[in-house]
Image (tube, helix red, strand yellow):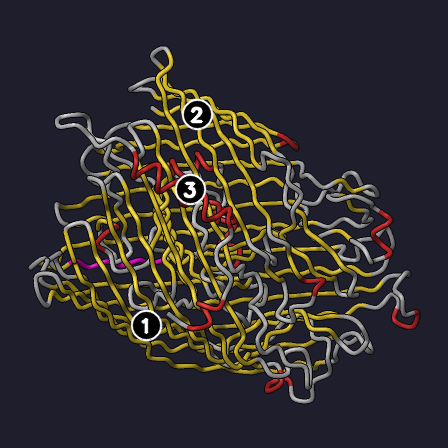
Amino acid sequence: MPAPFLRRPPLTLVAKAALLACATAAVTSPARAQGAPTEALQPVVVTAQKRDQNLQVVPVSVDSVSAGDLERAGVKDLFNLGDLSPSVTGGQSNRTLGARMGIRGINDFARNPGFDASMGVYVDGVYAGRSEATSLGLTGIERLEILRGPQGTLFGKNTVAGALNLTTRKPTDRFEASANVEGGSFGTRNLGAWLGGAVVPGTVQASVSVAQEKTDGWIDNLTRPDVRPGSGDGTTARAFLRVKPGSNAQVDAALWHYRYKGVPLFGEAVAPSPLAALAPGSRTTATDARSEETVDKDGGSVTVEAGLGRGLRLTSITSAQTATNFYSNDDDMAPLDIYFGNNTAKNKQFTQELRIASAPDPAADWLLGLFYMKQDSDQVAALSTGAAFPVAPLRRLTTTSIGSMQGESVALFAHGNVRLTERLQFTGGLRATRETKDITLSQTPIPGLAANIPQFGGQVSDSDLSPKLGLNWFIAPQLMAYGFYTQGFKSGGYNMDLIGSAVSNPSVDLRFNKQKVESFELGLKAEWLERRLRTNASLYRMDGKDYQVQQFVLQPNGTSVATITNAGEVRIDGLEFDLQARASASITFRGGLAYTDATFLSFKNGGGVGVNFDGNRLPFAPRLKSALSVEHTMPVGGLELRSSLGYTHTGEQTSNANGAAVNRIPSFELLNARVALEGGEARRWSVALWVRNLTNKEYSTVNATNALQQPRVIYGSPRTVGLQASLDL
């Protein structure tokens, strides 16, 4: 185990106690009597290796979350996924440019068309695209898999942090339908429905799902009560058609639409900013301008699966999608005309993936794949100073940045498993990638605030070869150990955000280099006590070279601007532990813990010439995150009462690589609860009362400064109570 890992403080007492209670409950529960009804956990099926497999025999650190898990935990979108899987970190300042998520301490938000996301999101095998992918609704989702660490030999788009693999509910010949309606605090109104069945029995099945989410937000705006940060209205629709032209072929077609309009969570001024007195108290602001954001995303895909004989299987996934994001932000946090920013981004994406997989065989299996992606991105960003801007000569001026990027990515990848002995298996893979990006950028100046950049063009062309090598040891029928080495890659690009500092050669000065990540991992997967206890653990080290850092950098004039640079080296040492247990037929536990020591080993000039960030922690990478939930069921007069309690702990973190005190986000703990009454057989129904943040904890998800270096905080939601009713046919 790495020495720095051992030098870190032990786990918090709360996390220890939570996991100890979970394990103790499972271990001390009565053993199942001979012939008694089983209390074993159900097997978890995942597709992490592009075929249906039991989670316990897959040599990958992967966590699987079912639709039921999401519902019972109150997880409505991907931003709250960390409530169930602590290795996932995220925060929602808005749905467009500030959507931030990561895995294993690697976080970013792709608000910049010249910058790729580190984490991949896939829906039924389709790469979901840029940062707006994390805003997807979860209605109609059957299962969600979290794959941790670099994923290059099995997934289309190369990723360095990990991947979220979403599988939607598929129709059968049987008519099925489900619906839910929900209302709660702060004007929460959610509706969702899924409908599926046969069009031509045995040959054609179809389904459609729709969902709408609304909230009035929990932030009070004293100046503009009609502009409440966090309020919004979103609609998701998805249509699916499956055709089986023969016994060994299948064609799936899908269309989807996502629309959202709301007010972003841009934060509120806090002491020592003098603006804090204008809106005293947490979750209160006083802005005068109309901030808003919109997301429009439309797409479609065709997936073809066909047998090629001798057990070979061909898979083709073709997808096209467009996304338009608009964002306007009164980031000055005051009822004064100080400055105002807006951004419009448009993205078109086409992907094609081809895979050939061997037949499932205990002795050996393999997969070959080809991936192609073309994307066109355009962005127009503007910042305007107002009549109250603190520097009089710079008042009532506007800087506009106009950029476009055309990119192509081509990759060949291979993955295979070979049984060396009865208990020892070799896993290997290789990915060859070539990516190009052609950009144009121009920017009008505001003297001393925004650089003058005449239009220029630049190109990035990066190639990479990433291997994976591992061994899997099947120690016993319910015990497997694995270890592997793998690499991840992310291409370079250009900083196409608003540029503050003057640059002499934009095509060179605004460029950042490709990033490489090496990952070493050891894992142990086990089931105990007649499969009533399941424990999966992994220990890893990730070393990043030329790590791409997206941060806000202080300028000599006292303002800050977003920029992207390459840190020298990054090291991430981590430990992950997942647990499921059936203490009895009526009590089930689920727990998870992620310890992440993410540090810049070398980051010279990270804060400007001569200002080094060596030894600082990576942004939004808490050293400790844990989650524990317990569910209890009991019969009540022919019905079933299902209650659950969830606990999460998030350790201290920072929002900026500089590690300044103003950017430190304190640790916090949250409790969520749910009680549901369920009934019916052919027609299942439930009515549930839920509470999030049961103790009404005041906590923050972002502590930072705005462009004028005024301290600001984005607070998490207060206690939220709701009622949900659902019906399944």
Which residue appears farthest toward the bottom when viewing the image?
Answer: 504
| Left or right of residue 563: residue 347 | left
Describe the element under mark 1 as helix, strand or loop.
strand
> Which residue is depicted at the point 56% across and 72% down?
549
Residue 234, by quadrant, is: top right
Q: Which residue is mark 3?
A: 238
Residue 511 vs residue 555, the one in the foreground: 555
Describe the element under mark 3 as helix, strand or loop.
strand
Q: Which mark is residue 726?
A: 2
**Position above or below: 101 against 182:** below
Q: Which residues are magenta?
A: 313-318
Q: Quick one: label 3 or label 2, which is nearer the N terminus?
A: 3
Mark 3 vs mark 2, CA separation in Å = 19 Å
* Magenta region includes residue 521: no
> Which residue is depicted at the point 68% across and 62% down?
663
Residue 399 vs residue 35, the one in the foreground: 35
Mark 2 vs mark 1, CA separation in Å = 44 Å
Which amino acid, mark 2? Ser
Q: Which residue is mark 1?
A: 486
Mark 1 vs mark 3, CA separation in Å = 36 Å
**Position above or below: 469 against 312:** below
Q: Position of residue 300 (x, y in %)?
A: 40, 51
Residue 637, by quadrant, is: top left
Q: Residues within 10 Å of mark 3 (few under 14, many from 20)?
A: many
